[in-house]
Image: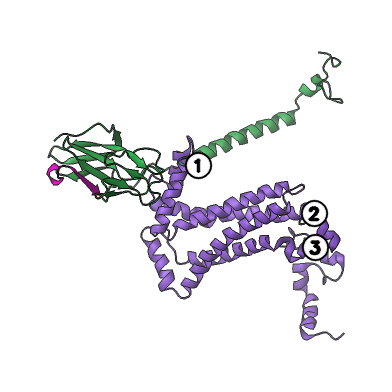
Amino acid sequence: MATTWTQQTLNHLRRTRAWKSIFRRGPARTNRTRSLAIFGNIFLHVLPVKVREKSLRLRATYYLGSFSFFLFVVLTVTGVLLMFYYHPAVPEAYRDMKDLRFVVANGVFLRNLHRLAAQVMVAAVFWHMFHVFFRGGYKPPHEFNWVVGVGLLLVTLFLSYTGYLLPWDQLAFWAITVGTNIISYVPILGHPIRFLLLGGNIIGENALLRFYVLHCVILPLAAVILIAVHFWRIQKDGGLTVREDHERKG
Amino acid sequence: MSSSDTPSEKPGQQNPEAEAEVTRRDFLNEIAAAALGVAGLGATVVTIKYLSPNVLFEPPTQFRAGSPDDFPVNSVTFIRDQEVYVVRTLAGFYAVSAVCTHLGCITQWKPEDDQIECPCHGSKFTREGTKIAGPAPRPLPHFALRLTADGQLLVDKLETVKETQVLKV
């Protein structure tokens, strides 16, 4: 079979010293080298080397977990881009949000992509959870990964909630007023938690800055760590749940 | 204690004297773990302290509502900036919080219905702050009301008083 130009170039590249120093392996043509391709890559090594064909069928997962992760990546990229124009301060926050909508080139696209992807992500994570629940995906040996998933659901909701305040408009202000007052109904610790979260007694500059730090640093870090454990666990627990009768039917 | 009459003892367990012997390594490990624990606890306490601000730049909780003559008898006046109602009855003056006790929305005085209504979840109160309807768990609190030396009404939002307390001018 004649090799194409791209294959020739790739083969040539693979023989160079630089390529070998980075990848330390030949082309993935055998099962061993295919496994090495996964093991030897920091981004892929949490993923399973082999998957069952059944677990790749659309109805097995609807790819809801992958879809949630894809949305997380979209939100990270658009969020970082929004940070270039946003000051977490009063009154700049509201003006920056308006600037992003009406002045900055493609700002309205990025802002709406971030906003809508966030709403879709909450729905996707819930849908993923229901799907796993009704398929029995939480059963042994997946119990711990279910718990990690519940953690990820909470992180998603907290990310959504902290991001809610950042536009600093009326909707944001009253949503956080109501939400933080719900927190203060927690017995004994309610008011101290609300005080710590807001950095004061009212929703002011301190609260905006705290929600910004939570939204942009602490919660995304927590999400990344939990996502890594979640993906790694799928591999360690022997791949995705595939129903027996699905397996038999082929 | 003999091992024969203690059935709870697991088989294969070493005799208690050998177990009680603590090696230097175990001792140092435990000391180190305890030190790390104390340091971790201290760091947590210090961080929580750090995160609670000592000085707050928030609106003052004491304010002058104006001269008593500004308020007609039998009236409810909403002071927007401070989120407080100043009520004058035949008996005198009192100040009622305008912040709903349910989830912190700002209520509105509806003179046509002679009641205070919350737009968020539909709580309703009388002008005395007593709940008539809705999810609010408590009546609206009354704030301390005094007269300053120059004869102005002074409201202190940090000090709540009984509903029966009325300032006579």
Rendered position, B44 above or below A47: above
Q: Are marks 2 and 3 in contact (CB under 8 Å)?
A: no
* Residue B138, quarter of the rendered image: top left
Cα separation, mark 1 vs mark 2, equals: 41 Å
Residue A238 is marked as: 2
**Residue hosting label 1:** B47
Any idea which chain is the green one in this picture? B
Label 2 Cα crowd, 10 Å radius (few <14 / some 14-19 / many 20+): some
Chain for disc number 3: A
Q: Which residues are magenta?
A: B68-78
Task: Report the side of B141 relative to A98 (left or right).
Answer: left
Chain for disc number 1: B
The residue at the point 71 percent across, 28 percent down is B27
Residue A54 is marked as: 3
Q: Amino acid at mark 1?
A: Thr
Chain for disc number 2: A
x then y, percent, for residue A114? 52, 65
